[in-house]
Image (tube, grey):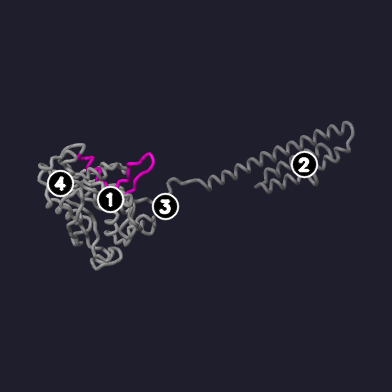
């Protein structure tokens, strides 16, 4: 084999390399020309080992030039093929920003949050302000200034979550009434506020109770406020929430911070007054407690009870939500069951 033969092999290899359409074809060309055993150019190394003197030097230069030319051409073609593959992949993965996306799943309000918002809207239309307060309270605001004596059952550890350690003396509020006290301590009548928030009591869970639940309390204090104002307000609000045809009844009760005191019930939406598991076979479900603010409570916060009077109330949005939507057990509202929540 001469130097011209090696040059001719190199030119032939360049043509085959240029015609290789993919990595497999390129590898076949490499083996054909450069494989140690059977490669056309590699076989020239055998004759090179047999050559002598000046012939060996000339043949060696031709062999090295041919091998280098073919090797460099293979590397360039391999880079071209890899770039082409990447280009095809990029085109296949390209994003058409003008193509419409599938509808996105959107979040929505929890049914209890929706009920709280509706209650707020009703009272805002009546001229009330919405205020918020701390969930961790002290005995003074949670009990003492609400005319609840030291021996009152609600103060017992079986009913109230008291904090321990360095936080001893503090508790998880049992109602949002402390913000009524804080509001009256901070100013002078008239007051018209509602206080939505989360509270906790040591209740055993059942279809109408949870240890942690939501509450909306309200306060109205002004000159000349009477039980008739309380009754009219409650009937209006409950009518807005449940509809005018849903049965509502007021009955006498007792709370240490109101006198007189009233509780409001609505007819069970499941059995419509016949009695079932949801209403504990009573036909009615307690929806809120209320009454005229006790004169001693007014006096304790610096409001003249001889000049001013007022009413207060507290309602449970959890129970209201269950009643409005026919949910048999309030615990279902907090089990994160999407089959229930997606219905809202």
| Numbered disc in front, either 2 or 3 | 3
State the image coordinates of residue 102 (x, y, percent, origin top left): 42, 52
Q: Is residue 24 left or right of residue 251?
A: right
Q: CA distance from mark 2 to mark 3?
A: 58 Å
Contact (Cβ within 8 Å) of mark 1 with mark 2: no
166 magenta-colored: yes
| Residue range corresponding to the magenta coloring | 160-184
Marks 4, 1: nearer the viewer:
1
Q: Is residue 324 shown in magenta?
A: no
Local SS, label 1: helix
Mark 3 or 1: the one toward you: 1
Secondary structure under badge 4?
strand
Distance Cα–Cα, label 3 vs label 1? 54 Å
Q: Nearer the N terminus, badge 4 or badge 3? A: 3
Residue at mark 1: 154
Give the labeled residue for mark 3. Answer: 102
Residue located at (31% from left, 48% from top): 199
For mark 2, what is the residue? 9
Residue lying farthest to the bottom in this orientation = 274
Residue drawn 21% across and 43% down? 129
Q: Which residue is mark 4?
A: 310
């Amino acid at each position: 084999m001469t130097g011209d033969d090696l040059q001719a092999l190199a030119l032939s290899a360049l043509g085959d390399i240029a015609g290789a359409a993919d990595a497999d074809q390129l590898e076949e060309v490499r083996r054909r020309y450069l494989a140690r055993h059977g490669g056309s150019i590699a076989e020239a190394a055998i004759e090179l080992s047999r050559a002598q003197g000046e012939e060996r030097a000339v043949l060696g230069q031709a062999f090295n030039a041919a091998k280098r030319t073919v090797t460099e051409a293979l590397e360039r073609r391999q880079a071209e093929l890899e770039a082409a593959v990447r280009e095809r992949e990029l085109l296949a993965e390209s994003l058409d920003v003008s193509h419409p996306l599938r509808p996105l799943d959107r979040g929505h309000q929890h049914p209890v949050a929706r009920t709280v918002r509706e209650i707020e809207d009703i009272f805002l239309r009546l001229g009330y302000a919405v205020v918020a307060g701390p969930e961790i309270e002290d005995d003074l605001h949670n009990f003492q200034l609400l005319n609840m004596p030291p021996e009152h059952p609600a103060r017992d550890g079986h009913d109230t979550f008291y904090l321990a350690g360095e936080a001893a003396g503090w508790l998880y509020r049992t109602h949002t009434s402390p913000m009524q006290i804080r509001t009256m301590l901070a100013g002078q009548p008239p007051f018209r506020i509602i206080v939505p928030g989360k509270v906790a009591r040591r209740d055993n869970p059942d279809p109408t109770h949870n240890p942690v639940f939501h509450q909306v309390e309200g306060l109205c204090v002004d000159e000349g406020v009477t039980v008739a104002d309380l009754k009219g307000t409650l009937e209006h609000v409950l009518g807005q929430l449940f509809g005018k045809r849903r049965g509502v009844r007021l009955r006498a009760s007792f709370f240490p911070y109101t006198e007189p005191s009233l509780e409001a019930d609505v007819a069970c939406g499941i059995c419509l007054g016949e009695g079932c598991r949801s209403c504990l076979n009573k036909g009615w479900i307690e929806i809120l407690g209320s009454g005229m603010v006790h004169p001693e409570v007014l006096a304790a916060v610096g409001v003249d009870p001889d000049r001013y009077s007022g009413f207060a109330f507290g309602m449970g949005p959890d129970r209201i939500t269950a009643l409005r939507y026919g949910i048999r057990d309030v615990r279902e509202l907090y089990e994160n069951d999407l089959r229930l929540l997606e219905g809202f």
